[in-house]
Image (spheres, rainbow, N blue to C red):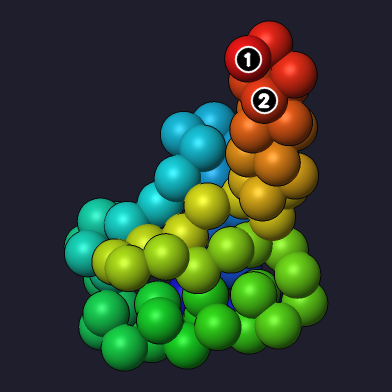
Amino acid sequence: MFKEERHAHILKDLKHKHRVLVAELATEMQVSPDTIRRDLQELAEKELVVKVHGGALPADFNEVLERCIKSNGKKL
């Protein structure tokens, strides 16, 4: 599988699952976990994902989290 295909697969999974795990992606795509980590690093550098321990979240995750924190703070 080419790098561009892996990136598309990762972004598609994120859209549907809202998170991806390195181990699951490596198994699904039959590549090493290190390959997935490098792919996630490249996507993070392009600000398409947010890397977390063991996987990644959608890039807009931080924005959603900040809005939730602000709205909860106003209710207090």
Is residue 73 or residue 2 the one in the foreground? 73
Query: Dot 1: few (<14), some (14–19), or many (≥20) neighbours within 10 Å?
Result: few
Task: Give how far across and how far down residue 42 sits, in percent.
Answer: 63, 84
Pointers 1 and 2 in contact (CB under 8 A)? yes
| 47 versus 28 height, above or below | below
User: Which residue is label 2 attached to?
Assistant: 73
Q: Residue at x 64, y 45 (%)?
A: 61
Quarter that holds the C terminus: top right
Is residue 27 or residue 72 the one in the foreground? 72
Left or right side of 33 for 63: right
Task: Give how far across and how far down residue 1 sits, in percent.
Answer: 47, 75
Numbered tag placed on residue 76 in the rendering: 1
User: Tag count in the figure?
Assistant: 2
Q: Is residue 16 visible?
A: yes
Left or right side of 66 for 30: left
User: Gap in Å between the C-alphas at discs 1 and 2?
Assistant: 5 Å
- The amino acid sitting under disc 1 is Leu
Left or right side of 68 for 30: left
Q: Residue at x 68, y 11 (%)?
A: 75
| 13 versus 42 height, above or below | above
| Farthest top residue in view | 75
| 76 versus 49 height, above or below | above
Give the quadrant of residue 48.
bottom right
Task: Give how far across and how far down residue 21 sits, in percent.
Answer: 32, 57
